[in-house]
Amino acid sequence: MRLDPVTMEIVGNRLSAMTEEMCLTLQRTSRSLYVKETADFCCAFAGLDGGFVAYPRGIGVSGFVGLNVLTAVQAAGPLEPGDVIITNDPYRSGGLATHLTDIQLIEPYFHEGELIGYGWAFIHCSDIGGRVPSSLSPVNDEIFQEGLQIPPVKLVRAGEPSRDVEALITANSRTPEANLGDIRAMRAALRTGRERLAGVVAQHGLATVLDAQRDLVEYTAGKARAALAGLGDGTHRFVDYLDDDAVSSLPVRLSVTATLRGGDLHLDFTGTDPQVAAAFNIATLGRPHAWITTRVLALICTLDPGIALNAGLIAPITVTTPEGSLVNPVHPAAVGVRHASANRVNDAIGGALGLAAPHVLPAASSGLVVPVVVAEQRGAGQNVQVLEPMVGGTGARDGADGVDGRDSGISNLSNNPVETVETEIGVEILRYGLRTDSGGAGRWRGGCGLELTFRVRGEGSKLLARGLERMCFRPWGVRGGGPGAATELIVNPGTARERRHFKIDVLPLEPGDVVTLLTSGAGGYGDPYTRDPEAVLRDVERGVVSREAAARAYGVVLAERDGGLAVDTHATADARREHRPDRLGAVGGDRGPAGRDAVTADGGPAGRDAVTADGGPERRAWESVFDTATVDRLVAALFRLPRPARTPRRTALYTAVLAGLPAGFPRTPPTPEQRDAARRTLIQEITELERMPA
């Protein structure tokens, strides 16, 4: 370290405060609902290597601390004071932008003609053009459908705005005024950062500020390695799934093998499915990108709550992401709904590291972020707004229930106030609250999902809900804890016009239609029959667990007493002794490259040291046919094919196997005969695939 610890701490705190003031400037001057209320934005200060030196702790999106601006800076060409770079291109920005609706601005900061760092700001804009209102749709199969691609170019040159660039952005958006308003708010935030940085340099000197950039990151990297070293060395694997790719009914597999060695962590995504012809791909460009390391950063900050937020957090992490896979797609793969896959990456990493630290890592979170978008006609134009960013709860962990209706797994977005929503969008909110009986049962209960019900008031309205997930494969519980409830999307529930939907593209709505979205609950931790009966009673009184579920899932019998409810201790003891449900089989993980202590997918015996996970009957049914080892063979064989041939061949293979299974599989379990026949077909198809020339 070049600086003494006191000076480094002072300068580090000042730089962090600078980024928070930048964020406040942006939020207070922004135009769109999704920025000023939901807070889908952030600002940071990057060093000369492009990594973030200072990042806000209490405002803005928390998960992007691992991004790097250097590729975008280099692509924009030589810089001078007063320049501002704009981009939204995931591929040309080196992964700085993660989909096209995330607009990035970068300003080089100079002192007496010397470049000393970069200010960064981003916002999620309401619309950047493309095939559908709000630009993002799960069924887009290439990035050209997702809107205007802006390579790293100069929005401002030497202090003079480029009206041509602004005009191009305006002409390609359904919400031009909101976009320009938010871009100007970002420029104001960057100006705030420039002015505050000048003050730090004036007080502490340029050499101190430059030395602090290196020291802060190196110090955080050392603390991050120390935190991970406490987990011990070992190799652990976990597999999880997206429900489907929105253009077929086939699940999409994510596999993570986590290897811990002396505080370093390697994440190997070999075994993950090829990139899909849909918008779920994550453009990491083979780097330890923010979208595939967020869970690790959260773990490090949990193990060391005082650690600073900067690029040092990702220094211990390396990755293997096969090119052409879901987590390292090749241009022009669509990436608009990458957050759905990022949630599943989080769950898979949590499952793998949970094998290393079962008393630290929680069960699966609800595993979804669903920006509920309503697009409506307003005169000659369109009003496109995110009505509410819907999430679920967090997974239960050893010693604590999950958090109800709140999951900051990939970002810490705020909910939109109902009054603001009804002012800016033609809807009436009928209910917005916690979803009863959605959290996975356990000694420690999984966090509940949410319910959003609204009535459409205007003509010509359309609903978009990108990121719908966990509608089939539920969030898993661990150590005997149960899975959370599955997500549901219902239009006009309880009426003759009721319609249930899975993933949607653009759903037309009529005036008076009622839409209900029920998000998934999180997984439970531990045997539900060991939960304190008084805790179950409190859950019932709060409305997060029904009286029926208390008896069914927890064996807790409640009786009417003195005008309220009380635990019937004798009946509860009898119920727990006599009606204890069979504990469900384990799914999802194994220890070591050879699977020595494998957690089996068919409910069979798990290894002595394995951490059991319960993903529900749907996952058990799926893996009774498509078990981990066999699908490893399948994925490896697919990657031997030319990239354009992988998805068609995968689809044909799964179609052949599924032809012999029930129509509702895996929601409808197969008979033993159907299962065995399907497995024979699977092996035959894989063997044939392996014989094909590479």
Image (tube, rainbow, N blue to C red):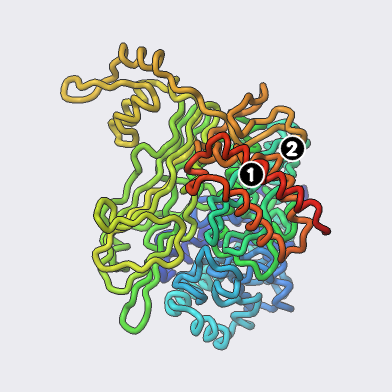
Outermost residue toward the left in this view: 563
Residue 573: percent from left, percent from top: 36, 13
Q: Residue at x 59, y 60 (%)?
A: 44
Residue in the foreground of this view, choosing between 177 and 428: 428
Q: Which mark is residue 531?
A: none
**176 or 60, which is in the foreground?**
176
Name the residue at the right extreme: 693
Total residue callouts? 2
Residue closest to the eye, 129 or 621: 621
Q: Is residue 510 left or right of residue 154?
A: left
Q: Is residue 174 above or below residue 491?
A: below
Say which amino acid is labelled 2: Leu
User: Is 600 on the left-hand or right-hand side of 261?
Assistant: left
Looking at the image, tell me whether mark 1 or mark 2 is earlier in sequence order: 2
Q: Residue at x 50, y 27 (%)?
A: 399
Where 444 sits versus 34, above or below?
A: above
Mark 2 surroundings: few (<14), some (14-19) or many (≥20) residues within 10 A: many
User: Which three-letter amino acid code belongs to the residue tagged 1?
Assistant: Val
Identify the residue at horizontal 61%, vertical 27% (top origin): 604
Looking at the rendered structure, the secondary structure element under dot 2 is strand
| Mark sitting on residue 296 | 1
x and y percentages locating residue 365 in the rendered image: 50, 42
- x and y percentages locating residue 675 in the rendered image: 59, 38
Q: Nearer the viewer, residue 674 or 327?
A: 674
Residue at the (48%, 32%) spot, across then down: 482
The residue beneath circle 2 is 260
Does any portion of residue 583 appear in the rendered image?
A: yes
Q: Is residue 264 left or right of residue 614?
A: right
**Residue 10, visible in the rendered structure:** no
Note whether 311 is above or below 300 in the view shown: below
* Element at label 1: helix
C-alpha distance separating marks 1 and 2: 12 Å
